[in-house]
Image: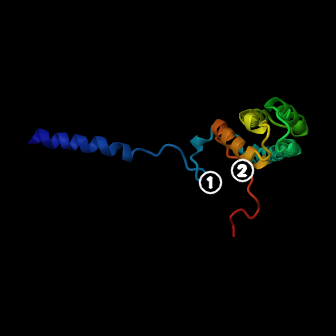
Amino acid sequence: MTIRVAALAALFLLTSLPAAAEQVGARAKGGFPESFFIEKIPRAEAKSTAEKLARSVIAARLIIFAYAGKFVDPSLGDKGFSGEVFETQWRAALEPEMIDATPNQKRLFEKLIWAGRQVMDNNQDRINTKGVGWKNFLPAKWEREMGQVFTAKTGIVIKQPGRAYRSR
């Protein structure tokens, strides 16, 4: 009987110890534990980094928008807009943004550009389909996919909803 009670007490202690342990990771503002953020940015750089990332995504969307006429032309096969072409144009557009970038920001921008190029490379079959007009590839679609890739790589969420996004 004593062995049985001791075994039950040991079982109870072993199963209740993890619940009593300290919580790992602190809840960050916005609901994500800080451990989710793979990339860390000093608080002093946070606002300028967020603004630079937002302007960079807008610049990329404008580049994609400039090619929209080619994307929906069913007579064209290869549109001449590969991931490499996109990256080259995006880097040129970002040059002024990168002049005063910190090393942390430059590291993030490399990952942002990598994610954007990955999405363009992944959508080449869709973009270059001959005989089809509407291919369902918009700057917003690129941004959503790029944001998912970037978030997976860095833990940083990028999205640009409208001012009145679901607020009504």
Residue 21: x and y, percent? 40, 44
Residue 30 tag number: 1
Q: Which residue, as the protein is rendered here, is positioned at the far top?
A: 84
Residue of label 2: 159
Q: Which residue, as the protein is rendered here, is positioned at the far left?
A: 1
Q: Secondary structure under badge 2?
A: loop
Quadrant of the rendering where the N terminus is positioned: top left
The mark nearer the N terminus, 2 or 1, is 1
| Residue contact between numbered discs 2 and 1, judged by CB atoms under 8 Å | no
Residue 54 visible (yes or no): yes
In the figure, residue 146 lies in which quadrant? top right
The residue depicted at 74 percent of the width and 38 percent of the height is: 126
- Crowding near pointer 2: few (<14 within 10 Å), some, many (20+)? some
Quadrant of the rendering where the C terminus is positioned: bottom right
Relative to 33, is 51 on the left or the right?
A: right
User: Looking at this view, is 130 or 99 the one in front?
Assistant: 130
Residue 164: x and y, percent? 74, 65
Mark 2 belongs to which amino acid? Lys
Mark 1 belongs to which amino acid? Gly
Q: How many marks?
A: 2
Residue 104 visible (yes or no): no
